[in-house]
Amino acid sequence: MAGRNNPISNWLLPLSILYGWGIKFRNHLFKKQVLRTHTFNLPVICVGNLTVGGTGKTPHTEYLIRLLQKDFHVGVLSRGYKRKSKGFVLAKQNTDFTEIGDEPYQMKQKFKNVTLAVCKKREEGILQMRSLKKERRPDVIILDDAYQYRYVQAGINILLTDSNRLICDDKLLPAGRLREPFEGRARANIIIVTKCQTKMKPIDYSLITKKLQLFPFQQIFFTTQEYLNLTKVFGHNSLPKENLKKASKILLLTGIATPLIMQQAIMSINPNVTLLSFGDHHNFSQADEEHINELYDKLHDDKSLIVTSEKDAARLRFSKHLGKNVKNDLYALPIEIKFLRNESEKFNHIITDYVRKNQTNNGVASN
């Protein structure tokens, strides 16, 4: 199974072999400690994948924040993909997405009390976060999208794989979407199969588990996406997601890696959907915004809606050329993840038990 988007390009496989040699050599340097890994005496949880985009890292990171923020001061450290700033940036309430990236901006808007920062060098970012004043210093740090960042050793590595395109069925870049070979899964403590259908059969769980070739020390979980009520992008109103059924027409506006999944979810409620899709993390230009205005004006009536993802909403909020109709009818469709087979308590216990057992009063790095 290659997945519904970006099929495997067999003619590029020779380049994938060369790319794989480079990745394996890099990993070998870490194994032999030629390249050094930093450890920290505080709980560090890494959320990541072996593929480029589209596995649901942000909603799973948000799940961890909700789980831990009741008892701990949570820190989130991201690279800040496509940000315009450099170095370490500590997010404040008035920080916009250009300084920290769209996904960190999305998380900071939802979780005001989280200490969120971006830094390309994660070991430097952790040290900076641990040097903050006590009221902002985190007890636990979640590394967002850092599975390939080998310079920091996390206490728990959570590896995500999309059920629609399992890592065992994919190929290395550029023929496929893998950042590193399938064998890289061995570094994971937990593997989560994401974007699952809610009515999976027991045989489906067994087949996927067998294909992923887990090691005895690894735990596997399955999650699905749950869409919440619509939130107004330009304003503070919300709409029940049932309003999607009442809409005469829906323009689905996305700049995400796998828009078809969101499209199919909305079309299961209302088939009158027009998809306008851009690349992942797309920065909307004036021409893009004028095109959005023109397309929506053709669809617009008293019962039409324009729907986007939370990640896209983070960028669209700063748009300067969207028309009145678009701004008035533009809603984000938030996502939360839900564990299948009633295994949320099992997952929660693993995470909270690790954090409690690894609490410390300082965060000095050791090499």
Image (cartoon, helix red, strand yellow):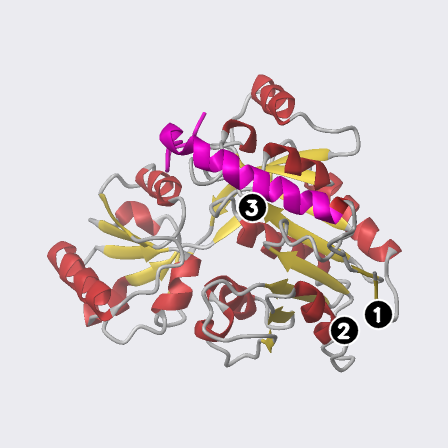
Q: What type is the residue that disc 2 sits on?
A: Arg
Q: Position of residue 167 (x, y in %)?
A: 55, 33
Along the line of sight, the residue nearer the viewer: 85 or 33: 33
Which residue is identified by label 2? 130
**Of labels 3 and 1, the one closer to you:** 1
Mark seen at residue 133: none
Which segment is the magenta one? 1-30
Residue 238 visible: no
First in sequence, mark 3 or 1: give its number.
Answer: 3
Give the SS element for disc 3.
strand
Q: Which mark is residue 337?
A: 3
Circle 2/circle 1 CB separation < 8 Å:
yes
Q: CA distance from mark 2 to mark 3?
A: 29 Å
Dominant SS in magenta: helix
Q: Label 1 amino acid?
A: Val
Query: As rendered, which of 304 and 97 lies closer to the eye?
Result: 97
Which of label 2 and label 3 is nearer to you? 2
Say which quarter of the image contains residue 356.
Answer: bottom right
Q: Nearer the viewer, residue 345 or 106?
A: 106
In this view, 196 is above or below 367? above
Q: Is residue 246 left or right of residue 69?
A: left
Q: Which mark is residue 364?
A: 1
Residue 205 falls inside the magenta stretch: no
Q: Residues within 10 Å of mark 3 (few under 14, many from 20)?
A: many
- Work out whether mark 2 precedes mark 3 in sequence or the reverse, and give the earlier one: 2
Q: From mark 2 to mark 1, how far is it between C-alphas?
A: 8 Å
Which part of the image, by quadrant, shows the N terminus?
top left
- Left or right for 270, reference 312: left
Q: How many marks?
A: 3
Give the mark, 2 or 1, whose residue is nearer the N terminus.
2
Where is residue 324 shown, x and y percent of the image? 20, 72
Q: Is residue 10 magenta?
A: yes
